[in-house]
Amino acid sequence: MALRRAAGLVLRIRDGHALDVRALLRGALVRERTATLVASLPGGVEHELTVDDIRALLEPSDDDTTRRLASLGLLVDRESADGGWHPDAAHFHFATRWRGVAAAGALEPGPSDRDAAVAGLRALRAALGPPPPHFHRAGDADDALALPDGRRDGELYRLLRARETRRSFDRTRPTTRDELATVLRYTVGCHGTARLLDDLVVLKKTVPSSGGMHAIEAYPLVAHVEGVAPGLYHYDVERHALAPVELLDAAAAEALVVEATGQRYLRSAHVLVVLTARFERSFWRYRRHPKAYAALLMDAAHVSQTLYLVCTELGLAAVATAAINNGDLDHRLGLDPLREGTVLACAFGYPAPAELRQDFDPFDPG
């Protein structure tokens, strides 16, 4: 059987320390640096490699080492599908997926007390020095062309000005089923189709998409929606329907929001929309393309901004976060990570009253 290295295979050097046993026997405590070459696949399991393993990865042959690497999935049949991944994009995606990570302190919102939040920023500045300037200039500043005012009135411009990030939600006032339907229809829903080939149909949506492939999928994690049982769902775009993946009670749904994001303050979210990228859909057109994965991340960002605007129009609060436990979510959703994977999450719901807000708003004078 002709073999090749598996798609998404990542090799890296793991640095560490080990005790010098000979020195320890002499009564001395000496640590020496170690370096091990490890191989990992999209599932996240790592395998330490020997010199013989490296030779077999470079030139597979019919020997025990090659057969062992094939049993681990590091070597596969040359005819097997590789998912169309570009190696550098696969390295970035799978090396940066999280499992069981709680958001770092820097990712947590500041307290609602403005003085305490500013004190935290002062401590950060003292530790890291002054931040880069908030306004940036490039080019010939003396020859800059002044622009007309450019301001406009109208609903779209009002929404853009009103859009904001909120992380605190009102548990006493659930989002309605109709509001959930509106958010999904106008962020990831379909508003028309066109058949280009017998088996190639393109969709019209409210967001742009690389190559018109619309490879972003939505999996709403419902916690507090009137008329919808708590649980994890897939949004069926064709039928504008919610297909249950896993039904939960409200407490379990809240816990899963925290588990998925590692962010305790999102526990009160009414809905967490988990956005995934169907890599196989995009890579069909952009096979092994070095920019295809980056374009998918931009597609997800387009969806999140549209969700902000739709929520703003409905009087709902919203927040988007990339600090998600992708690996755990992929497993919970039963995804094949080479073909589809989580890239972003957006929470929304009715905003908490001002006195109950847990996040700091720098534009709120109160």
Image: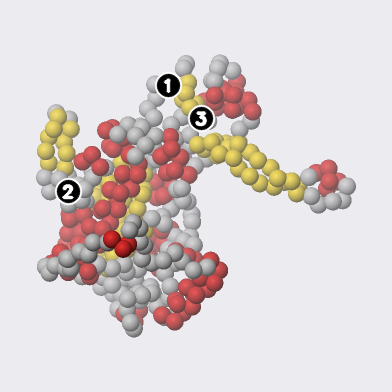
| Mark sitting earlier along the chain (1/2) | 1
The residue at the point 83 percent across, 43 percent down is: 22
- Residue 137 appears in view: yes
Quadrant position of the C terminus in the picture = bottom left
Which residue type carries mark 1?
Arg
Can you give x and y, in whole percent of width and height, for residue 191 in the image? 12, 48
Task: Using the image, tell me which numbered label, if any, was put on residue 205.
Answer: 2
Which residue type carries mark 3?
Leu
Task: Using the image, tell me which numbered label, if any, was put on residue 74.
Answer: 3
Q: Nearer the viewer, residue 315 or 176?
A: 315
**Local secondary structure at mark 3:** loop
The furthest residue to the right? 26
The residue at the point 47 percent across, 51 percent down is: 99
Which residue type carries mark 2?
Lys
For mark 1, what is the residue?
Answer: 78
Can you give x and y, in whole percent of width and height, for residue 209 in the image? 23, 45
CA separation, marks 1 and 3? Answer: 12 Å
